[in-house]
Image (spheres, rainbow, N blue to C red):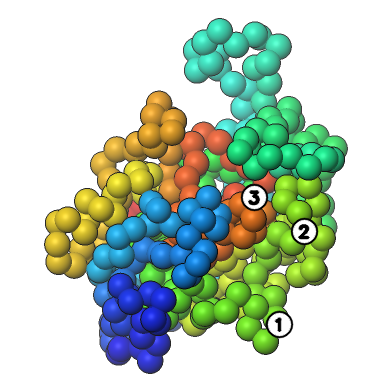
C-alpha cells in the first residue's frame, strides 16, 4: 500500500513509501517483526536551519534516492546480553575484545600495550572542544561484552540490556549461529522508517511530540555530563521507549547497530547517478573513508545514548555512522534479520 505519510515541505526530495502487499506464509520467529519491504526514498536531510547540527551529519546520506527491498523478518530489539550469553555458552565463542591483540597487527606497538580490551566512553571532568573525539574515548584494558566499561564493571542484573563491545565479526558470528544475518543498510533504514516517508525521526516530525521522550539520547552539556532527563543516564534496557510503525524498538538512540554494508561516503551518489530504483542494494564492494583511508569500516545505524544536537544528531533516521570492523564500543550493538524462507542465506 501507499502510506498516508508523504514528504513534508522540509523534505521535498522524498516520495511516498510503497509497501509490498504480500505477507509471509508462516508466522514469524519468536521476537521478530515482519517488515513488508517495498520501494522507498532512502537517505536524510537536516531540518531547515539546522544544516550544521551533528557535524553536518547527513552529508554522506545524500542525495535522496529510491530503493526497493524484499520483505524480511527483523529482531524487535537489539540482541541482549542474555541472548548473547546463550550463544557464547553454546559455542564457547571468544569475542575480539577478549583476545590479546597480535603484534603483527600493530607493528611497533610496545608489548605491554598488547592487552585485550576495547573502547569506552570516558567523559572529561571539564569543558572541552568538540573537535577531538579522543578527549572522551579511551582504550580500556579488560573492557568487553561482560565488562562493558572495564574489568570493574559487570552486566549482572542487565540481562535485558543490549549487548555491547561487539566487533563486526562477533555480531556476524552470533547471527549465523541464530540462523539469521545482519541487515543491509537499506533493509535497516526501510525497517526504521516504519512506513513513514521523509520524516526526520522514526516516529515522525517532532523530536519530543507532546513533550514525550521517544528515544534514549544525551541531555546536558556534551560530553561531560548526561543529565538523564529522558530517565536514563547512559545505556538503558531494551524496549523502554515506544516502538515504531513496524513494532521495532530502539531504532533511534540507546546503542548503534552494525549493518552488513561497507562504508563509503559517496555510495549514495553512485546509486543516484545510476538512475532508476536500486533493488536490494548490499553496499559498495570495498570500504573507503577519506578521513582514515587505511581503515576497513562497516556502516552503523541508529545513533546511541550519546547522540545530541550539540555534536552527533544521528538519531535522525537516514543518517549514517561508521566503524572499523574489529572495534567495539560501549554504545554499539546489533540486531538480526531473516528471510521469510527457511533457507535464508547466512
Q: Is residue 242 left or right of residue 29?
A: right
Position of residue 161 in the picture relative to residue 54 (left or right): right
Q: Secondary structure at mark 3?
A: loop
Disc marking residue 331? 3
Where is 341 relative to 53, above or below? below
Q: Earlier in the sequence, mark 3 or mark 1?
A: 1
Other-residue count near label 1 (Cα within 10 Å), few / some / many at <14 / 14–19 / ≥20: few
Query: Residue at 57% across / 79% down in the picture?
Result: 206
Q: Residue furthest left?
A: 275
Nearest to viewer (mark 2 / mark 3): 2
Mark positioned earlier in the residue sequence (1 or 2): 1
Whether pointer 2 and pointer 3 mark residues with C-beta atoms closer than 8 Å, the reply is: no
Reading the image, the residue beneath label 1 is 211
Residue name at image x 68 percent, y 65 percent = 216
Res. 18 visible in picture: yes
CA–CA distance between discs 2 and 3?
18 Å
Q: Residues within 10 Å of mark 3 (few under 14, many from 20)?
A: many
From the viewer's perspective, is the residue at label 3 or at label 1 nearer?
1
Residue 236 drawn at (x, y percent): 73, 62
Number of numbered tags placed on the structure image: 3
Query: Which residue is more in the foreground, 228 or 333?
Result: 228
Residue 146: percent from left, percent from top: 73, 43
The residue at which mark 2 appears reads as 220
Amino acid at each position: 500500500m501507499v502510506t498516508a505519510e508523504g514528504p513534508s515541505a522540509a523534505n521535498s526530495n522524498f516520495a511516498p513509501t510503497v509497501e509490498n502487499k504480500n505477507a509471509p506464509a508462516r508466522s514469524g520467529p519468536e521476537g521478530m517483526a515482519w517488515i513488508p519491504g517495498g520501494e522507498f526514498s532512502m537517505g536524510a536531510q537536516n531540518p531547515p536551519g539546522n544544516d550544521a547540527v551533528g557535524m553536518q551529519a547527513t552529508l554522506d546520506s545524500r542525495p535522496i534516492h529510491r530503493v526497493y527491498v524484499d520483505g524480511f523478518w527483523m529482531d524487535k530489539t537489539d540482541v541482549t546480553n542474555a541472548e548473547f550469553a546463550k550463544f557464547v555458552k553454546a559455542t564457547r565463542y571468544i569475542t575480539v575484545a577478549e583476545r590479546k591483540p597480535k603484534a603483527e597487527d600493530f607493528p611497533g606497538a610496545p608489548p605491554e600495550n598488547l592487552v585485550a580490551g576495547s573502547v569506552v566512553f570516558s567523559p572529561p571532568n571539564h569543558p572541552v572542544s568538540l573537535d577531538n573525539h579522543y578527549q572522551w574515548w579511551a582504550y580500556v584494558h579488560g573492557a568487553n561484552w561482560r565488562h562493558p566499561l572495564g574489568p570493574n564493571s559487570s552486566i549482572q542484573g542487565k540481562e535485558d540490556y543490549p549487548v555491547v563491545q561487539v566487533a563486526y565479526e562477533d555480531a556476524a558470528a552470533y547471527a549465523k549461529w541464530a540462523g539469521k544475518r545482519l541487515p543491509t543498510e537499506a533493509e535497516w533504514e526501510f525497517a526504521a522508517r516504519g512506513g513513514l516517508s521523509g520524516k526526520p525521526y522514526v516516529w515522525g516530525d517532532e523530536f519530543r511530540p507532546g513533550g514525550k521522550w521517544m528515544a534514549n539520547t544525551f541531555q546536558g552539556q556534551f560530553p561531560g555530563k548526561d543529565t538523564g532527563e529522558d530517565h536514563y543516564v547512559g545505556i538503558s534496557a531494551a524496549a523502554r521507549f515506544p516502538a515504531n510503525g513496524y513494532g521495532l524498538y530502539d531504532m533511534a538512540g540507546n546503542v548503534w547497530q552494525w549493518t552488513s554494508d561497507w562504508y563509503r561516503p559517496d555510495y549514495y551518489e553512485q546509486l543516484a547517478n545510476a538512475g532508476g530504483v536500486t533493488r536490494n542494494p548490499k553496499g559498495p564492494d570495498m570500504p573507503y573513508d577519506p578521513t582514515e583511508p587505511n581503515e576497513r569500516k562497516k556502516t552503523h545505524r541508529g545513533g546511541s545514548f550519546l547522540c545530541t544536537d550539540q555534536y552527533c544528531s544521528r538519531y535522525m533516521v537516514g543518517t549514517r555512522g561508521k566503524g572499523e570492523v574489529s572495534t567495539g564500543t560501549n554504545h554499539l550493538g546489533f540486531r538480526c534479520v531473516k528471510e521469510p524462507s527457511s533457507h535464508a542465506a547466512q
